[in-house]
Image (cartoon, rainbow, N blue to C red):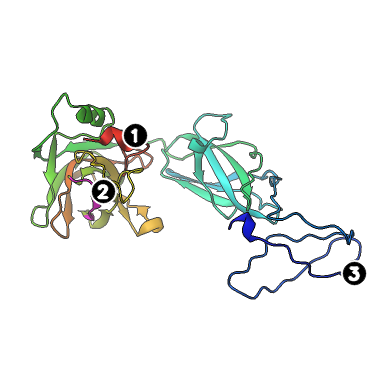
């Protein structure tokens, strides 16, 4: 709410004892909000107009520790903040010790003093710091840094398989758009066109028993849109259901973006913020994976990856095109 929308109202005089006092307020009306309380023994004093901007950060979180460690996750906990106006915490992580907190190292902002960092590489050390943030956005100094190592020392399995035939209507080899796409790992010469009547069947030679995740590289073949792709393998199911849009283009933009861009996405289950990565338990030997769509689609799949490394991220663009999208203009 705009600071100009707040007004001070004098509630009257109260006789208060020395020490701490608690006030209970009952606010009637949907449009009323209580922002601050001004208490003074100077009956002539008046608070300034607008909000009372709090610029004091909360106390530094204490007791950061790793309470649980698995092959692909680390459970973090710390002592609850004593400041009553703490809204959430910022969790920062790095594989480098004595790191500086920065936006690029922010991995979560939980409201409770705990967080599970998931999708990590086994047998790897990670470093963490936590800050408290109040309702005004003031952030505390970071906690003491801790280090925790994921379990497991087994060899990471990575199986890649390109699919499909050569695509039609490719941008010229020397075109600006193609060069940019290739530099970003977002270009594919060959791909399989998925339709309702043309699913994709891929057979993998799985080298070892284990828990695997699936990555697929795909494009929509048009400016923007969405398509829900179903993955079936070893009696488990997952989906690729992200809308392929370009950040910065806006819904009313008249720009035309390169329809040849391909992005990576991980097989998941769930909806929206409740998505979770699907883990497939596979045995050594040949395993068949099927990708299908419920209706006709222009979606194309160029590559599929199976890996036991739950922290693996393929080179290229993940789900959307980051930053300024001008490099995708045709």
Tag 2 residue? 282
The answer to whether the residues at label 3 and label 1 have Cβ atoms under 8 Å apart is no
**Label 3: which secondary element:** loop
Give the camera-side residue of 139 and 97: 139
Position of 314 relative to 237 (above/below):
above
The answer to whether 37 appears left or right of 74 in the picture is: right
Residue 12: x, y in percent?
83, 70
The answer to whether one can see residue 48 in this image is yes
Q: Quarter-wise, where is residue 15 in the image?
A: bottom right
- Which residues, given as a range, are shown in magenta? 222-229
Q: Pointer 1: residues within 10 angstroms few (<14), some, or many (20+)?
A: few
Which of the marked residues, 2 or 1, is nearer the chain's N terminus? 1
Which of the marked residues, 3 or 1, is nearer the chain's N terminus? 3
Give the camera-side residue of 204 and 227: 227
Which numbered marker is on residue 155? 1
Tag 3 residue? 15
Q: Pointer 3: residues within 10 angstroms few (<14), some, or many (20+)?
A: few
The answer to whether 88 appears left or right of 42 in the picture is: left
Q: Residue at x 62, y 43 (%)?
A: 131
Which numbered marker is on residue 214? none
Q: Quarter-wise, where is residue 316 in the image?
A: top left
Q: Residue at x 26, y 45 (%)?
A: 254
Q: Residue lying furthest top in this view?
A: 174
Give the camera-side residue of 277 and 307: 277
Position of 222 relative to 5 (above/below):
above
The answer to whether 35 appears left or right of 40 in the picture is: left
The answer to whether one can see residue 316 in this image is no
**Label 1: which secondary element:** loop
Q: Nearer the viewer, mark 3 or mark 1?
A: 3
């Amino acid at each position: 709410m705009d600071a100009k929308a707040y007004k001070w109202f004098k509630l009257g005089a109260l006789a208060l004892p020395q020490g701490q006092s608690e006030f209970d307020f009952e606010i009637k009306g949907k449009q009323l909000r209580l922002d601050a309380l001004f208490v003074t023994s100077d009956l002539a004093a008046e608070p300034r107009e607008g909000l009372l901007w709090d610029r004091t950060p909360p106390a530094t979180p204490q007791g950061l520790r790793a309470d649980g460690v698995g092959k692909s996750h680390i459970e973090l906990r710390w002592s609850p903040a004593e400041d009553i106006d703490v809204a959430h915490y910022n969790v920062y992580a790095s594989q480098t010790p004595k790191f500086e907190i920065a936006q690029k190292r922010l991995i979560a902002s939980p409201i409770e003093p705990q967080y599970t960092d998931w999708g990590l590489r086994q047998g790897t050390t990670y470093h963490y710091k936590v800050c408290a943030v109040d309702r005004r956005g003031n952030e505390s100094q970071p906690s003491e840094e801790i280090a925790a190592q994921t379990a497991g020392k087994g060899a990471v399995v990575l199986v890649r398989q390109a699919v499909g035939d050569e695509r039609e209507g490719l941008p010229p080899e020397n075109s600006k758009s193609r060069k940019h796409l290739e530099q970003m790992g977002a270009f594919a010469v060959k791909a399989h066109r998925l339709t309702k009547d043309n699913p994709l069947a891929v057979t993998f030679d799985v080298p070892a028993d284990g828990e695997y995740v699936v990555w697929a590289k795909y494009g929509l073949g048009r400016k923007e849109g969405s398509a829900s792709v179903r993955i079936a393998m070893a009696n488990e199911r997952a989906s690729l259901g992200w809308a392929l849009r370009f950040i910065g283009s806006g819904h009313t933009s008249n720009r035309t973006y390169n329809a040849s861009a391909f992005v990576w996405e991980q097989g998941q289950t769930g909806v929206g913020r409740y998505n979770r990565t699907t883990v497939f338990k596979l045995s050594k030997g040949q395993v068949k994976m099927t990708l299908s769509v419920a209706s006709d689609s222009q979606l194309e799949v160029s590559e599929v990856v199976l890996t036991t490394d739950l922290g693996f991220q393929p080179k290229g663009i993940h789900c959307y095109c980051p930053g300024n999208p001008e490099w995708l203009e045709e």
